[in-house]
Image (cartoon, grey):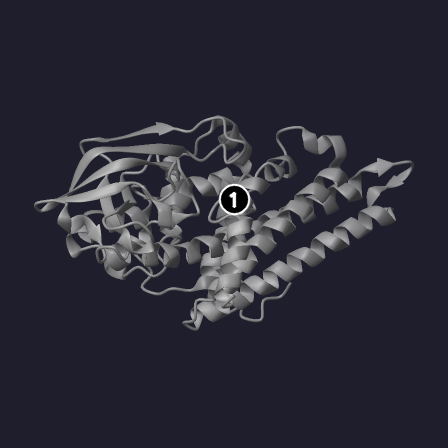
Amino acid sequence: MKNPYETEERAAFRETVRRWVADKITPNADAWDEAGDVPWEIHEQAGALGAFGFGVSEKYGGLGFDDCFMRAAFSEEFAKCGATGVPAALGGRGISIGPIEKLASEDIKDLCLKDIVSGTKGSSLAITEPSGGSDVARLKTTAKKDGNHYVINGSKTFITGGMKSDYFVVGARTGDEGLAGISLFFVEADAPGFSRTEIERKMGWWASDTATLYFDDVRVPAENMLGDENLGFIQIMHNFNYERLAMIAGMVGMMKVCLDASIDYAKERETFGRLLIKSQVIRHKIADMSARIDMVEAYLNQICHQANEGEMPVAEICKGKFSASKALEFCASEAMQIWGGAAYLRGNPVERIYREVKVNAIGGGSEEIMRDLAVRQMGL
């Protein structure tokens, strides 16, 4: 579907990412998925493309500008590798850069930001806890003031990129219960009292390292607080908007892979003496898949346009995310049906995408939470 907001610069960026994915990622995606790891040079190559530089000053290796269409293009094209655990392995950095760039002191930025943006070092956002994910207001990890330090105690889980990250943006309770008592902190992986364990045997995202983090009297300087005390919830919510936008775009990319793979297979596979593509039931499946992709993509373009104009459309992002995950569920299932038994064998993109459906319906805010938040944004 043609994007009415396309420009030469956006098209050139998308084409650069598309070539990189086709050359460096897709041929290796299945092997990396099976190995449960992505070579670190992929992080650095993505950094060289400018993938982590949106909204970051050129002083710190950023692009010096932001553009939601380019953010979306990177996520969509990367997801087309057909093994979304690979882009997920880099995703922790993408959702933790914003708070550091916007809220950290100059000393902290000088310490880490250029390395993070370039892909040389990793960073992760640490919000989700064993007791709950989307209900950030009930966060239990604490940060108690002790002189010119804060002492952090608690744990985080399902932290994307958590095993390899050098730096973390950590949400901790500094005040009373509820929304108004949460602050953000910058924590280095070598801080005394910090430890982590890997979460294994995941349903999907095999190539992405996922961790549980432990904070046992971790002392950080008071200057490591990101932003104002007890106002971290607002920053967390703002950061979620970009994460969800990237997930919508990634799901568009996965749906397109399912559609293209289904068409290619239907043109080659013969049943009952004729090609699958000549069967009306298969043609209708392809039409339905294509229609859902077009609808989500058009909605995504409108979201990106509004965000670029300075109005972050929170309700639309929420509706876009659960609409995209339901559309992805449909497209992945229909692609499996078209491929039949061949799709049930590991090693093809349809199989890989099918097992990635649920993480997109849960991560970054579940479908149920997204519906509720959308309605609240409508004033209801």
Tell me if I can see residue 252 in this picture. no
Relative to the observer, which residue lies in front, 304 or 77?
Answer: 304
Residue found 59% across the figure and 49% down from its top:
325
Give x and y (percent) for residue 361: 55, 46
- Packing grade of label 1 (10 A; few <14, some 14-19, many >=20) is some
Relative to the observer, which residue lies in front, 50 or 136?
Answer: 136
Residue at the far bottom in the pictured view: 309
Relative to the observer, which residue lies in front, 341 or 366?
Answer: 366
Residue at label 1? 362
Residue found 41% across the figure and 72% down from its top:
310
Tell me if I can see residue 224 in this picture. yes
Task: Give the position of the N terminus as an image quadrant.
Answer: bottom right
Residue at the far left in the pictured view: 147
Q: Is residue 289 left or right of residue 269?
A: left
Q: Amino acid at mark 1?
A: Ile
Q: Is the residue 368 above or below the residue 140 in the image?
A: below
